[in-house]
Amino acid sequence: MKHLPVLLFFPLIMVLHQASAQKTDSIYSLEKVQLGGIPQTILTTGTDSSKPVLLILHGGPGYTEMALFRIFNRALDKDYVVVHWDQRGAAASYDPSIPESSMNIDQFVSDAHELVTLLKQRFKKNKIFLLGHSWGTSLGLLLVQRYPQDFTAYIGVGQIVNMMDNERISLQYTIQMASKTHDTTAMRELSTIAHRYPAKNDTSLNDLYLQRKWLSYFGGAVRGHRDYSYIFSRIKPGDPLFNEKQVEAGEAFSMRTLWKQLLNIDFLTTAPVLKVPVYFLTGRYDYNTPFALVEKYYNQVKAPAKKLIWFENSAHIPQFEEAARFNAVMKEIAQR
């Protein structure tokens, strides 16, 4: 897939037009904002600036989802002002000059808090909705835990709960599937890491990539598919929201600097109580962020309101695997 060599950045644009004799705002903005002292890219879309603001925290670490949400989930624009953020070091916010010392979870939470404050001011909101996917759920829970006054509700898609248990369960699934299908290549490769993974050391990242290769192959990432190509084939060459070289460079940089930190997360211990309503949107076949851990956390966490919503035909990315249902669920959340 060929893409434009650079992303095109546009200033904030709000085009006003008349529809059904009512004034509405058609919003599309791709821009750089200063967060934590460095320029970072956000995309803002919507049909009406009076709608609630939804900030989406992408997965990875370091993997943009702007283009995919625009393909699969554009219906969100009817119910929210949707804001996507390429986080520090990711895709359109990647720059090789970013200090590695700044690539830490506390800095990401601080960047996110700055962005939330900016959005509240820009759209004159007291609170906004927050959605995290995969890695983004780690930032999301930390944000709502530290700044509950900023958020109407939190939505976790592929929620991270306890990362060491996460990796143990995920590895066990791939080994069981390799055995069940008599896949000798998978069994041989997975046996090389079974005695040492997961671990908080420098070999852990290479072991992760090997394990995730087989996790995808056995349908634990995208239900019924052996890799993500079914999803990414929808991105057209030249899409200005997906510069392949930048995406790959940002993901490699982010994973290398953040993966070991991510392994320390255990929300069962550190976030037993949340002060905002929470929704967990979970694929029934998710073994990337295993559904069993999400259900365990849901049963234990105390919150003003909580709901676990199953996606019966999805694994790790229900927002794209079951896009129509995901969009309908998000519409219901907005209306509540």
Image: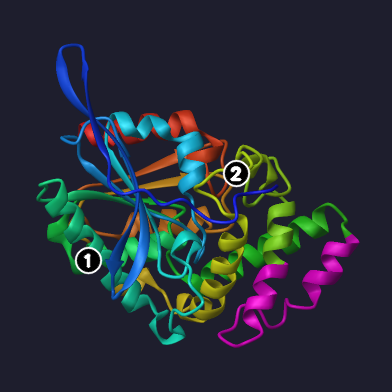
Q: Please, what secondary structure does the residue beneath circle 2 have?
A: loop
Percent position of residue 27, x then y: 28, 36
For badge 1, the amino acid type reads: Glu
Of label 1 and label 2, which has the lower sequence position? 1
Residue at 12% over, 59% down: 149
Residue range of the region highlighted in magenta in the rendering: 184-210
Residue at 70% over, 67% down: 211
Closer-to-camera residue (113/28) = 28
Closer-to-camera residue (170/158) = 158
Closer-to-camera residue (21/251) = 21
| In this picture, residue 102 sits left or right of residue 158 | left
Residue at image mark 2: 238
Answer few, some or many: residues within 10 Å of disc 1's Cα (few below 14, many 20 plus, some between 14 and 19).
Answer: some
- The circle on residue 264 is none
Answer few, some or many: residues within 10 Å of disc 2's Cα (few below 14, many 20 plus, some between 14 and 19).
Answer: some
Closer-to-camera residue (241/230) = 241
Percent position of residue 37, x then y: 29, 76
Query: In which quadrant of the rendered image does the C terminus lie?
Result: top left
| In this picture, residue 184 sits left or right of residue 173 | right
For badge 2, the amino acid type reads: Gly
Q: Calculate the distance from the C-alpha at mark 1 to the C-alpha at mark 2.
A: 31 Å
Residue at 27% over, 37% down: 80
Is 205 situated above or below 320? below
Percent position of residue 195, x then y: 72, 81
Is 244 situated above or below 147? above
| In this picture, residue 294 sits left or right of residue 196 | left
Q: Please, what secondary structure does the residue beneath circle 1 have?
A: helix
Residue at image mark 1: 114
Q: Is residue 16 magenta?
A: no
**In this view of the protein, can residue 271 be seen by the observer?**
no
The colour scheme of the drawn protein is rainbow
